[in-house]
Amino acid sequence: MKKFVAFTLSLLFCTSIIIAHVEKKRCEICSGSGTVACLTCGGRGTTYRTTKDGKKQSIRCNTCNGTGRRTCTACGGQGWEFVNVTQNYAPLPSPPSHEPQKHNCTACNGRGTVQCPSCRNSSYGAGKQMCSTCFGMGYKIINILTAEKETCTVCNGTGAKPCAKCNGSARVDCQACNGVGYFEER
């Protein structure tokens, strides 16, 4: 027979619950009766004593009070034993807390983004980098001998292309607050 028993453990405040999984089994010593034969009288309820004249006299057993039975010490007279007892400690839910306080991130001043480190000092402007195809000239040389040029198709002749790191926005997520702009204090 399986039972689940829960006891609360309280030390100053209730902090956890002990959940015990208990399985009951019939006692093998007393066969579930809760009593065993008295060892003093052999289960008869009487013992013998020798009188002064040497005769044996039958008297009531003081150990079992003449019943011939004693409480089973294996099961404490219950007739069953606990087996496979396992205990788990489950924390009690914490009381509702106040709203977490939000503090602005000092790295991004609460914006969640910072200037892109790849293009912030670019001479091509915020969010732009030098075109790697034409090396910032805006054209490609087709023939070195004739100095024939062609407008760069990557940057359309501007010599600059959008920054690969920020996609031309000149800002990236703040790494200190993961782009949120604040920290929560609990």
Image (cartoon, rainbow, N blue to C red):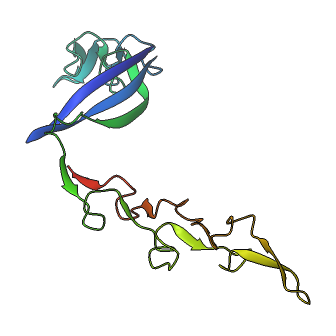
User: What residue is shown at x 53% (from left), y 75% (from top)?
Assistant: 124
User: What residue is shown at x 34% (from left), y 56% (from top)?
Assistant: 112
- Residue 182 percent location from the top left of the image: 27, 54
- Quadrant (top left, top right, bottom left, bottom right) of the N terminus: top left
- Residue 116 percent location from the top left of the image: 45, 69
Q: Nearer the viewer, residue 80 or 157?
A: 157
Is residue 100 shown above or below 66? below
Q: Residue furthest bottom?
A: 145
Q: Nearer the viewer, residue 161 or 149?
A: 149
Q: Is 95 situated left or right of 41 in this image?
A: left
Residue 11 seen by the camera: no
Q: Is 34 situated left or right of 151 in this image?
A: left
Is residue 164 shown above or below 35? below
User: What residue is shown at x 44% (from left), y 74% (from top)?
Assistant: 120
User: What residue is shown at x 69% (from left), y 64% (from top)?
Assistant: 156
Q: Nearer the viewer, residue 52 or 36?
A: 36
Is residue 119 shown above or below 185? below
Rendering quarter of residue 86:
top left
